[in-house]
Amino acid sequence: MATQQIFSPLPGIFYRKPAPDKPDYKSDGDAITENDTIGLIEVMKSFNEVKAGAAGKILRFLAENEEPVMAGQPIAEIDV
Amino acid sequence: MTIHKLLIANRGEIAVRIIRAARELGIATVQVYSKADKDSLAVRLADESIEIGPPQASKSYLNQATILAAARTTGADAIHPGYGFLAENAEFAAAVEAAGLVFVGPTAHSIRLMGDKVAARGAAAAAGVPTVPGSAGRLESADAAFALVETTGFPVMIKAAAGGGGRGIRIARSAEEFHHLMPQAQAEALAAFGDGGLYVEKLIEGARHIEVQILGDGRDVIHCFERECSLQRRRQKVWEEAPSPSLTPAVRDRLCSSAVALAKAVDYRGAGTLEYLYDDRSQEFYFLEMNTRIQVEHPVTEMVTGIDLVCEMIRIAGGEPLRIRQEQVRVRGHSIEVRINAEDPAKGFMPSPGTISALSVPAGEGVRFDSMLYQGYTVPPFYDSLLGKLIVHDKDRPSAIQRLERALAELSVEGLATTKPLHQALARDPDVMAARFHTAWLEPWLETHASSLGTAMPSPTAKVAQ
């Protein structure tokens, strides 16, 4: 097992859930597969999914819901 | 009251536009900004600036309490909302006036009335302005719906009352189809939304989007003729012009008079726009809605009429009566505006925030560039993608299109992708040159032309030189 980070592919606002009234995509400790969506980045009013990119387990999120993020900023730590 | 210090509760190119107008009127300016907009052109140009919160619009440009506090702190006596954000928020307009400040726009009552679709439609009907034929409210039975479509004619759209964003819409082209589709639509609406209520509206196929600019002072209203904005992608206008190339003088006269009648009926104050669908085969127009603010595409009207709409709306807000009489408003030549967005038209209009590494702005006769750009500026990812608007004016439409091509070739924005290649392709398209388009024209065109929008085309002179 090794610890890896998931980076934001784009600059924008990070969301952990698909809509304000929906549950989070993933929580700390959840198992993930490569194609799982872990959040959304809103860039200029368009929404883009962030994929896990690797299978494993979410250790913790490094960016909070509705937090502004830069491209390349780590948003979660995973165990692969 | 006369305005001495104006706070701009907006950002981007429209904030720059408002600062310029205020300065020409001798009014001091205060620019509010989110943390992400600290380096914006508007902040650089304004006399004063004040931070109002984090990048997210919900916590800055939409935060009414913070904006009002900023006005108090800086001693501003008026607030201009621009477009978007709080521009059509009746509660905000009321709060501004309750705080003893001037809201540069209509009354909260006008905003509320025109923001309610059913009320606006009712006001239009009362003023004798045609609306899209259809049911005034929800229809509960198939019989009531059929009685109605016998008066509107076909095709009609059947819409779920509880639906939205195009969901649950069916199109019936004959009575037979209608009888077949209506029960289906009702059952589906009930299953999907728990509400079987339906609306029926005549479908105006191949309609153009034409809108009338008006100015009112609460008593008198004038129109500043129309704009045509039929080239749209996902309901966003991309190319706008004035005057409309598709109206006859008689229809133009009827259309503009109807807009004045409706604005007068609601004692409208400030700058406003009445949007219509126009069917050029039947020469019928139908009122859609009224926008109770300055619009993105206002410059094309300014270019052909010579009226500074932003200055006029500030003067009216300051208590001056209308300074222009209807017979003084004349259209001279033709103007076109294209929206330069930070989007890549070759990649499905993917947003393209980034840093402007180099910038050349077109100039010369009949060219205007309203933008928020400067070299070295970093376009933040948090707001809409509009970087600026390239506006041209010339003696007629063919010359204006040629001038647009010339100006686009001079425009160079490096460091991010823009919609410039789209406009270059449109300016050379035979249908665009002949004004053969309608609101559903651009999207299918984009599907067949996507591959040609990758790189900016060489300018005509560059071709000659090769």
Image (spheres, rainbow, N blue to C red):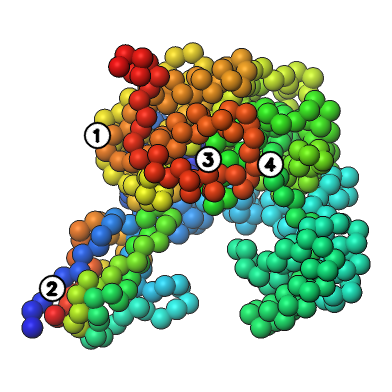
Q: Nearer the viewer, residue A64 or A45?
A: A45
Relative vertical location of residue B5 with respect to residue B393 in this rendering, above or below: below
Q: Residue at x 24, y 56 (%)?
A: A71
Distance, label 1 to label 2, CA atoms, is: 33 Å
Distance, label 3 to label 4, CA atoms, is: 14 Å
10 Å neighbourhood of mark 3: few (<14), some, or many (≥20)? many
Residue ID for mark 1: B357
Chain ID, mark 1: B
Same chain for the residues under marks 3 and 1 in the image = yes
Q: Is residue B43 left or right of residue B198?
A: left
Same chain for the residues under marks 1 and 2 in the image = no
Residue ID for mark 3: B238
Distance, label 4 to label 2, CA atoms, is: 54 Å
Chain ID, mark 4: B
Q: Work out which quarter of the rendered image holds the C terminus of chain B and state it.
A: top left
Which three-letter amino acid code belongs to the residue tagged 2?
A: Gln
Distance, label 4 to label 1, CA atoms, is: 38 Å
Chain ID, mark 2: A
Which three-letter amino acid code belongs to the residue tagged 4?
A: Arg
Q: Nearer the viewer, residue B447 or B169?
A: B447
Chain ID, mark 3: B
Q: Residue at x 36, y 79 (%)?
A: A24
Nearer to us: label 4 or label 2: 4
Q: Is residue B27 left or right of residue B305?
A: left
Which three-letter amino acid code belongs to the residue tagged 1?
A: Ser
Same chain for the residues under marks 3 and 4 in the image = yes
**Where is residue B444 shown, x and y percent of the image?**
54, 48
**Is residue B248 visible in the rendered structure shown here?**
yes
Q: SS at mark 2?
A: strand
Q: Residue at x 33, y 57 (%)?
A: A12
Q: Earlier in the sequence, mark 4 or mark 1?
A: 4
